[in-house]
Image (cartoon, rainbow, N blue to C red):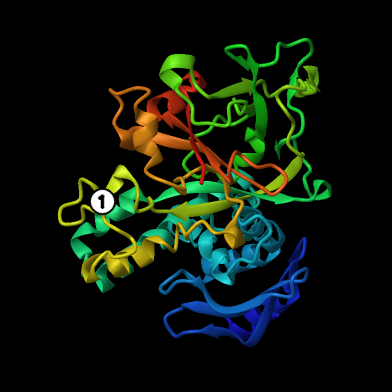
């Protein structure tokens, strides 16, 4: 590859923009090694917050066919707006590292593309790009976990811990003006005209959330949710106390509506159920490990953290607990609300998986998947500053059987 031609190509395509994100080439620009490896120095700005981050990104690995590599770089530059959009959208508009734009490298290893046009076709296919980004995120998370395990002398558990990594979808509230879709917390649900309002026994349930599944698909890396339609969550909040599912039926109800929403209308909540303020949300990817207070570590030899006191864990586990807190920081007022789909729950009290699994004793606690976590907000409290967790057996989620969803309500 010709260095001068590459630099001209890169400078013609940068800066690239998507929303408030701006990607620039910064000094020393690019470096072309003798083995064909190409690295570039990039800076990603958030023009809304003023944040920026510089990073050297490997654009082309070593030992590539020069003509094919040049076609690849040309396509990468031409496709930067759509590639940047994928990276930014997966992070919900928050700051992203320039290294997230390395994910198209997989096309050099797995694709038969040879020309710029062929590369561009793949770079601009949203489904393909989302798959690359998901694979890159998973690989980065696995590398991080393995590095930490080696540093903590837990190398023998690295494979097991990597296998526990799951992708969640954080739902960050925003002003209504920023939410373009049907996904929302609170407000009114979109129901078929004349549909009966959900009740538990004789009590009207409170509408908590409506999720546009098509909108979530760009962040659902594990493809656990249906690809389209609406997911709606209701809860019985009238008693203000924990639910007794065995005696009175599940405290939460999960409903689905078809992807063709033209026959649905915003339906007002019965007065006795109460209405939470409507909030639009922005989804973003959240890769995490299970929290300390969960059943997922019980089968790891020499790493049984059951009953471990986080306040006095002993030197052996202190560093590991600190690592887990990277994924599940203590629930304080400065780091809430934490609304989430999939991934792992943030326990406010004790292990919610064990509580939920009493609904179906034949299903092991580790086979209950967090479907949603709905947090309190100042003007929408769930009891005493509580959280509601909705779990579902993994086989039921795969089958789309949301009748088996169960709720756990934690309060202070």
Above or below residue 36? Residue 342 is: above
On the image, the x and y values in percent for residue 336 come to 60, 55
Q: Is residue 111 visible?
A: no
Above or below residue 272? Residue 337 is: below
Q: Is residue 146 left or right of residue 93?
A: left
Q: Is residue 362 visible?
A: yes
For the residue pair 281 and 377, the one nearer the viewer reads as: 377
Above or below residue 323? Residue 205 is: above
Query: Residue at coordinates 47% horizontally, 60% vertically from top-left?
Result: 329
Instruction: Classify 10 Å Cα crowding around label 1: few (below 14), some (14-19), many (20 and above).
Output: few
Q: Quadrant of residue 335?
A: bottom right
For the residue pair 7 and 303, the one nearer the viewer reads as: 303
Instruction: Residue under label 1, please give it.
Output: 307
For the residue pair 78 and 353, the one nearer the viewer reads as: 353
On the image, the x and y values in percent for residue 412 come to 51, 46
Query: Residue at coordinates 62% horizontally, 26% vertically from top-left?
Result: 238
Query: Residue at coordinates 22% horizontally, 65% vertically from top-left?
Result: 154
Q: Is residue 244 left or right of residue 198?
A: left
Task: Indicate the secondary structure of the residue bearing disc 1.
Answer: loop
Q: Quadrant of residue 367?
A: top left
């Amino acid at each position: 590859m010709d260095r001068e031609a590459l630099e001209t190509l890169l400078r013609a395509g940068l800066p690239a923009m998507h929303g408030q994100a701006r990607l620039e080439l910064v000094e020393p620009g690019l470096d072309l090694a003798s083995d064909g490896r190409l690295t570039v120095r990039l800076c990603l700005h958030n023009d809304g917050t003023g944040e920026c981050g510089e990073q050297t990104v490997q654009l082309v690995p070593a030992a590539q066919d020069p003509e094919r590599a040049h076609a690849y770089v040309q396509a990468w530059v031409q496709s930067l707006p759509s590639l940047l959009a994928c990276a930014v959208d997966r992070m919900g508009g928050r700051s992203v590292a320039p290294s997230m734009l390395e994910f198209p490298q997989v096309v050099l290893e797995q694709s038969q593309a040879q020309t710029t046009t062929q590369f561009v076709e793949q770079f601009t296919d949203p489904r393909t790009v989302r798959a690359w980004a998901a694979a890159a995120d998973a690989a980065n998370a696995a590398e991080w976990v393995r590095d930490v395990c080696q540093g903590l002398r837990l190398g023998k558990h690295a494979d097991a811990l990597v296998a526990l990594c799951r992708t969640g979808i954080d739902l960050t509230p925003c002003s209504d003006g920023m939410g373009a879709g049907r996904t929302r917390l609170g407000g009114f649900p979109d129901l078929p005209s004349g549909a009966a309002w959900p009740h538990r026994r004789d009590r009207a349930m409170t509408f908590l959330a409506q999720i546009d599944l098509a909108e979530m698909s760009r962040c659902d890396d594990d493809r656990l949710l249906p690809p389209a339609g609406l997911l709606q969550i209701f809860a019985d909040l009238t008693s203000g106390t924990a639910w007794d599912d065995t005696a009175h039926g599940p405290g939460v109800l999960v409903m689905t509506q078809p992807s063709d929403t033209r026959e649905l209308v915003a339906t007002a909540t019965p007065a006795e159920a109460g209405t939470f303020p409507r909030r639009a949300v922005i989804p973003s990817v959240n890769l995490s490990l299970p929290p300390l207070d969960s059943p997922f570590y019980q089968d790891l030899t020499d790493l049984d953290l059951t009953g471990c006191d986080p306040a006095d864990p002993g030197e052996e586990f202190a560093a590991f607990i600190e690592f887990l807190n990277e994924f599940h920081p203590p629930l304080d007022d400065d780091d809430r609300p934490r609304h989430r789909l999939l991934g792992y729950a943030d326990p406010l009290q004790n292990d919610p998986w064990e509580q939920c699994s009493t609904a179906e004793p034949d299903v092991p606690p580790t086979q209950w998947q967090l479907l949603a976590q709905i947090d309190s907000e100042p003007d929408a409290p769930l009891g005493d500053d509580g959280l509601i967790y909705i779990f579902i057996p993994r086989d039921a989620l795969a089958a789309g059987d949301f009748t088996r969803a169960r709720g756990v309500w934690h309060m202070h």
